Image (cartoon, rainbow, N blue to C red):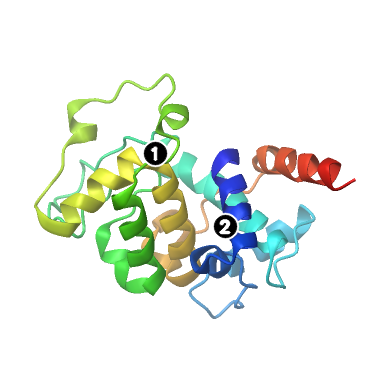
Amino acid sequence: MALCYALAVVELERGNTAAMEMAEASEGETSTDALAVYQDELEDLGIDVDDDGLETLRGLFVILIGLGMRESSGNCYEGRDMSADNVASDTCEAGLFQMSANMHSSSPEMKKLFDAYWKDPQGFLDVFAESLNPTSSNLDIYGSGKGAAFQWLARFSPAFCVFSTAVGLRKRKDHWGPIKRKEVTISKDGTLPINLIREKRAGEDR
């Protein structure tokens, strides 16, 4: 997650529109923005998400770390929820954050991210997959077309999965039950890998 955060910081500095959407200021309590749900908890950790920029991006990644552990125990290969009957390609969840392809309608950035990573799916799989032994049910793909392609890419390009979920959290938070029910743990520990990047950058600036 620290690697993906570092990449997001670089993309934000480059003016990448997906990263800019991730780093927009919190939209307030009545919005569809996950940052608004956890704004008070983030402020308790000293993270201010009231303005566009790096600090808001940092807060979003703290939520992502908690959500990933809640949805898949950090398993980037996770397949659909086997307790559910849903097997349609567009609504089958896949990957670290259990997102489905039908989230593409939440933002134009979703298609841009899909197209970019489909063309080059390199996305830190070797790091995310360390010590994992996926089962056949983890790797099953349901249906065909873009929905099936999404299921594959969400597993095999963790950076794509992280960035598309980051955008989705800002635009359609209720896609994730643990966010909707406010069950994601926001912990100071979740800020540690992000702070390492922050401290390194501060040292380089000096």
Q: Position of residue 65 (x, y in %)?
A: 55, 44
Q: Is residue 107 visible?
A: no
Kind of residue at badge 2: Glu
* 10 Å crowding of disc 1: few (<14), some (14-19), many (20+): some
Q: Is tag 1's residue or tag 2's residue first in the polypeptide sequence?
A: 2
Q: Which residue lies at the image location 63% right of the left edge and 49% below the top edge?
A: 186
Residue occupied by mark 2 = 11
Which mark is in front, 1 or 2?
A: 2
Q: In the rendered view, does 54 fall on the left or right side of 85?
A: right
Q: Quadrant of the C terminus?
A: top right
Q: Position of residue 191 (x, y in %)?
A: 69, 43
Q: In the rendered view, does 182 fall on the left or right side of 113?
A: right
Q: Position of residue 96 (x, y in %)?
A: 39, 42
Q: Residue furthest left?
A: 143
Q: Quadrant of residue 38?
A: bottom right
Q: Which mark is residue 72?
A: 1
Q: Is residue 77 visible?
A: yes
Q: Which residue lies at the image location 43% right of the left edge and 64% below the top edge?
A: 168
Number of numbered labels in the structure image: 2
| Frontmost residue, 133 versus 71 | 133
Q: In the rendered view, does 91 fall on the left or right side of 145?
A: right
Q: Which residue lies at the image location 37% right of the left edge and 65% below the top edge?
A: 112
* 10 Å crowding of disc 2: few (<14), some (14-19), many (20+): some
